[in-house]
């Protein structure tokens, strides 16, 4: 159990890893601090609880072949699960409740699950992403159950847009 860390709960910035059966609770002091942060390839994130964190519950950025399955992601100050500039990733069978409990900010990114292309830290679109069989329930400031977008304006390159995102069999309730 990782509780009360002043920054991120768990950080994986490598390839070929498993993050499983952990509890990340009340980590971070600001919105840039995540419960679980993944920047790598061939990573499995399965069976974790990421709750009450000051930033994103599970944040996957600039990664390939990551699976995020069977996690409980509740009451985080920002997005529940974020997939940012990634390729060949699966988000399946997760339970998300009452995320985006923080300040009411840019409505475009206030989602339980967000798939986005970034023009900042990681440049490029998401490709071959599957978001399936998740149970998403909204919260006070959450605007969307699942959102796929480019929230920060024009693409840096039209040759690298988000492409081939499948949203299948999810349950989304207010």
Image: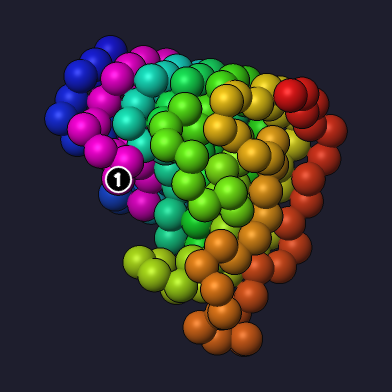
Q: Please count the marks in the image.
A: 1
SS category of the residue bearing label 1 = loop
**Against 7, is 61 above or below?**
below
Region of the chain picked out in magenta, as a range: 21-39
**Against 25, is 143 above or below?**
below
Figure quadrant of the C terminus: top right
Name the residue: 48% across, 40% down: 104
Residue 50 percent location from the top left of the image: 42, 22
* Residue 114 colored in magenta in the image: no
Q: Is residue 42 visible?
A: no
Residue placed most toward the observer, 81 or 154: 154
* Residue 24 colored in magenta in the image: yes
Instruction: Identify the image quadrant of residue 6.
Output: top left
**Against 90, is 80 above or below?**
above
Instruction: Identify the image quadrant of residue 127.
Output: bottom right
Name the residue: 21% across, 33% down: 29
| Farthest residue, direction left | 6
**Against 119, is 92 above or below?**
above
């Amino acid at each position: 159990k990782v509780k009360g860390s002043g920054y991120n709960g768990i950080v994986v910035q490598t390839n070929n890893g498993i993050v499983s059966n952990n509890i990340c609770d009340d980590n971070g002091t600001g919105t840039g601090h995540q419960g679980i942060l993944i920047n790598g390839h061939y990573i499995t994130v399965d069976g974790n609880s990421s709750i009450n964190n000051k930033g994103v519950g599970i944040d996957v950025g600039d990664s390939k072949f990551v699976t995020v399955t069977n996690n409980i992601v509740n009451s985080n100050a920002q997005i529940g699960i974020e997939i940012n500039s990634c390729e060949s990733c699966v988000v399946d069978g997760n339970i998300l409740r009452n995320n985006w409990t923080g300040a009411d900010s840019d409505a475009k990114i206030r989602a339980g699950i967000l798939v986005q292309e970034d023009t900042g830290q990681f440049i490029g679109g998401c490709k071959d992403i599957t978001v399936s069989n998740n149970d998403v329930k909204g919260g006070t400031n959450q605007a969307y159950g699942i959102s796929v977008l480019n929230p920060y304006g024009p693409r840096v390159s039209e040759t690298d847009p988000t492409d081939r995102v499948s949203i299948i069999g999810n349950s989304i309730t207010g």
